[in-house]
Image: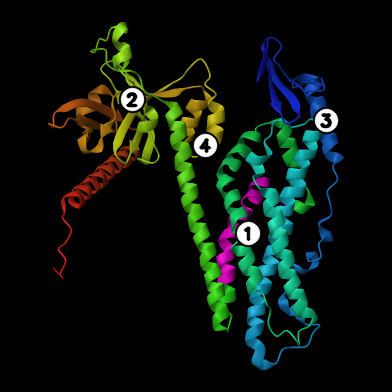
Amino acid sequence: MLELGSIHLTTTGDYWVDSVSNPKFGQTIEVARNGMVYDRSGKDKHKHISDLENCLSSMKITDFRGYEFYSLKDKTWNEVMEKHQNLPTDQLDWRKQQEAMWELFTSECTYFLDHLLVLKMIFMNTLKYLQTHEYLLDVDLWRLFANLEELTQTSLGFSNSLFGIIKGYVDAPETSPSMDFISMLTKYFRGSLCQSHQTYCLNYSAAVFYLESLRQRDDFGIYLKWFEQNERCRRLHLPELLVAPLHRLTRYPLLLKNIWKRSTDSTEKIMIYSIKEKVEKSIRDLEGRVKWLDNFQKFRHLQEIIVWPPLWDRDKRFFIPECLKHIFKEHMAENILSPTNRHLLYEGKLTLAESTRFLDVYLFLFDDFLLITKAKRNKKKLGGSDMGLMCPSLTSELQTVIKEGGSCTVLDQPIPLDRLVVKSIDPLHVSVFGLRNAFLIQHENRYRQCIAAFLLQAQTENIKKTWMAQITSAISCFTKSQESKKISLFTLPAESSEI
C-alpha cells in the first residue's frame, strides 16, 4: 500500500484503487489507475450508480440451452424409453437400476444447469465483466466463489459422461441390456468430483460471511439485485446458490445407495458399495477438516484479540524496576491459545462486581482453564474488521469489539479447571449491592487456598445457570481425563499368559 498525504492507494489486480474519506466535505472518493475519479457523495454517487446499472444492462449472458442434455433434466426414464421397445418381464430388475442411474444423471444436470452454471455465468462472470470496466474492483473473487470454475467443469464432465452412457444404451437397447457405468463412477467419485467439492466446502463459511459484509455496499447491492431478478435464477438468491455444492456432496451417497440396492450382479454391488463408502469417507474427512479449520482460525484470531499484560501492569503489588523488566520473558500467548492443545467450550459477556464499580468482562471457558478478560476499546483501529471477516465463527459480541478496534485484556492469570470452584450466590446475600443472578468463581492454589475470587453477574437467571452448568461440566470432564492419564501412566502392562 502506498501513502500519499491523506490518500491511501492499494493495488487490486491491474488497477490502483483508492478509497478516501474527506471529513470536511463528507465525501468518499475512489481513484482508478486510469485517473478516473468516483465521488461517492451527492450527484457523483448517483452518477456512479447510474453508470454501474448501464454497464450491467450491457452484459450479455450465454444461453444455457446449448447443452445437449438440457431438454432431458425434467424428463422421467419412462418418458425417455417410451419410444423404444419395452424390456421383457425377466429384465424388469434392469429397469429399476436404470431408473436409479437416470435419477443420478438428471439430478446432476439440474445441479449443473440451475446452480453451478447460474453461479458462474450470471454472478461470477458478470463480476469479472464489471471489474474490467472498473467497478467493484476490490471484491475478491476467490473469497466469494472459491474454485467454482473447477467445480463447474468437473460437473459438466460428469454429466456428459453419464449422458454418453445413457445415450448409448437408449440408441441400442437390444444389444445393451445393461449400462456399463461402473468404471465411469469410479473415475469421478474417486477422483476430481469429491476433491473439488471438498475445496469449495472448506471455503463456504468464510464466503457467506464475506458476502454479508459486501451486501452493506450500495454498488454491490445493485449488482445482486440486478441478477437475482434474472429469470435464470428462478427467484433464488446468491446465498441459496452458494450452498448448493454442500447439499450436492451430501446427496451423492444417497443416490449411489439407491443404485446399489437396485443392482443384481454381486460383483457390481460390491464395487458400487465401495464407491459409496469412499464418498462417505470424503464427507467425514471434510467435516473433520472444517471443524479443525474453524477451530484453527478462531484460535488464531483469539491470539490477536486477547492481550496479556505484563506482571507489573496486571498486579500493582509487584514492583519491577525498569532496568529489570527485560529479565521477565513474556509467556507467549500463541503457546497458551493453541488449537492443538485445547478447545474453547463456552464464551460470553458477564458483569464483574468490584469494590467501587461494575466491570463488563468477557469469559473464555476452555477445556483446561477459564480466562477472564476485559473488553477494551482502542482509539486507534487495529484492522479488526478484516479479522472479523476472515473468521465467521467468532461471536457477534467479539466481532463488534474487533470492528471498534478493541481487544480483550486479561484481568488475571488463567484459572486451571482443577483449581476452580464455582458457587451460586443466594439473592438475599447480594441484593443490597444491587446484584442479581450472581455466582462466585474461586481460584485455589495447590494447597487449596483461595488466591482470587470473582463475583460475576449474568443478565438473566437462565444465563447464570447455563454458565454454572458449563463450568461444572468442564471441571468434571477435565478431572476424568486427568485421572485416566494417571491410570494409564502408572498401570503396568498385563503379564503374558504364555510365560
In terms of secondary structure, where does tag 4 sit?
loop
Q: Give the Cα distance between marks 1 and 4.
A: 27 Å
- Residue lying at the far front in this picture: please name it: 499
**Amino acid type assigned to the residue bearing label 4 in the image:** Cys
Q: Which residue is mark 2?
A: 331
Residue 356, position in %: x, y? 28, 15
Label 2 close to label 1 by CB (< 8 Å): no
On screen, residue 484 above or below 468: below
Is 250 magenta? The answer is: yes
Q: Say the numbered circle drawn on residue 50.
A: 3
Give the camera-side residue of 354 and 373: 373
- Kind of element beneath mark 3: helix
| Badge 3 or badge 4: first in the primary sequence | 3
Which three-letter amino acid code belongs to the residue tagged 1? Answer: Leu
Q: Which residue is mark 1?
A: 193
* Residue 457 shows in the view: yes
Q: CA distance from mark 2 to mark 1?
A: 46 Å
